[in-house]
């Protein structure tokens, strides 16, 4: 890795399902947490994706900044690349007035203790691993064990004060992006949606998304859970 760079999986705009308004979505590459049932297993492998400095990423997303309300950093696990994440957030903060939101699979205890220098650049932080057994009734998160923290006045001006306990309301939306022959989904689907989509596409001889990650003999349960 070049100094100051960060591993990226993909970048999309506009993302309307992962925070306030129309957002730039930045999916980072690599996750050491590997929650069973994660909908983005293609972002787990640190060896894939592409490497960019904050300046290179700014060049890429710069054309969208004037239209975007915010930027969502997800993955992959953003805090598995703490140095690159801090530099990236500093750069985004310096060039962008919208809110900066990050998802992490680490607990808020760990993040507040280990990464205060990173958190000072964020407006919204969503924490905790995906846990399919915890239920999925709360807005803006994949499972109900996850927590939402509004860290700045900008966040409290845009998001409801009860965000951490706010239930999902109305129809749940997903963003679908097309890139050549590939299609990517952004948002938080209902339980069972990924499996139903996978089976539906298979039934018409289409491959769904990215293949499951490499089999890891130390964690045999992980692959079984991907499409169940
Ligand atoms: S849900 Fe997040 S933390 Fe969990 S495996 Fe997926 S990318 Fe990693």
Image (tube, rainbow, N blue to C red):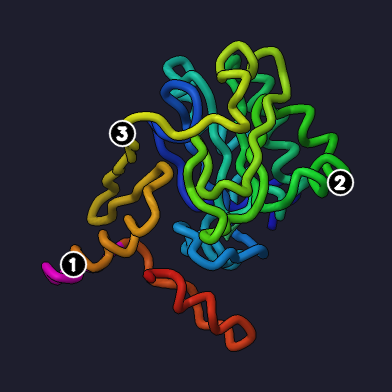
Earlier-in-chain disc, 2 versus 3:
2
Residue at x 42%, y 17% (from the top left corner): 67
Cα distance between the residues tagged 2 and 3: 37 Å
Give the quadrant of residue 99. top right
The furthest residue to the right:
113
Magenta segment includes 53: no
Residue drawn at (70%, 42%) of the image: 85
- Reading the image, the residue beneath label 1 is 206
Closer to the camera, 135 or 3? Answer: 135
Whether the residue under disc 2 has CB within 8 Å of ligand 1: no
Percent position of residue 9, x then y: 50, 53
Closer to the camera in the image, 13 or 41: 41
Q: Which residues are magenta?
A: 202-208
Give the side of residue 66 with respect to residue 219, left or right: left
Expressed as whole percent of the image width and height from the top left, the position of residue 36 reads: 54, 67
Q: Position of residue 115 (x, y in %)?
A: 83, 42
Disc sitting over residue 114 in the figure: 2
Locate residue 30 relative to residue 183 in the image: left or right.
right
Q: Which residue is mark 3?
A: 171
Q: Position of residue 4 (x, y in %)?
A: 73, 45
**Mark 1 Cα-neighbour bin, 10 Å: few <14, some 14–19, many ≥20:** few
Q: Quadrant of ligand 1?
A: bottom right
Indicate left or right for 63 with 95 as reference: left
Task: Answer above or below: position of 225 versus 38.
Answer: below
The part of the image, by quadrant, that contains residue 39 is bottom left
> For residue 204: magenta?
yes
Residue at the spot x=71%, y=55% of the render? 80
Which mark's residue is nearer the viewer, 2 or 3? 3
């Amino acid at each position: 890795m070049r100094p100051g760079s960060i591993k990226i999986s993909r970048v999309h705009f506009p993302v309307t399902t992962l925070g306030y308004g129309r957002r730039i979505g930045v999916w980072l590459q690599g996750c050491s947490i590997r929650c069973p049932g994660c909908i983005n297993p293609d972002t787990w492998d640190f060896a894939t994706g592409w490497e960019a400095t904050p300046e290179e990423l700014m060049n890429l997303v710069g054309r969208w900044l004037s239209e975007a309300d915010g930027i969502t950093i997800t993955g992959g696990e953003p805090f598995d690349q703490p140095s690159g994440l801090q530099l990236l957030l500093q750069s985004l903060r310096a060039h962008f007035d919208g809110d900066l939101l990050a998802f992490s699979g680490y607990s808020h205890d760990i993040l507040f203790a280990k990464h205060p220098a990173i958190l000072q650049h964020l407006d919204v932080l969503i924490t905790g691993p995906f846990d399919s057994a915890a239920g999925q009734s709360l807005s803006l998160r994949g499972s109900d064990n996850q927590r939402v923290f509004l860290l700045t006045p900008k966040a409290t001006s845009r998001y409801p004060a009860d965000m951490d306990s706010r239930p999902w309301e109305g129809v749940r939306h997903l963003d679908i992006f097309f890139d050549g022959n590939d299609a990517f989904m952004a948002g938080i689907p209902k339980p069972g949606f990924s499996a139903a989509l996978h089976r539906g596409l298979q039934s018409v001889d289409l491959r769904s998304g990215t293949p499951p990650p490499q089999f890891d003999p130390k964690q045999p349960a992980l692959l079984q859970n991907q499409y169940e």
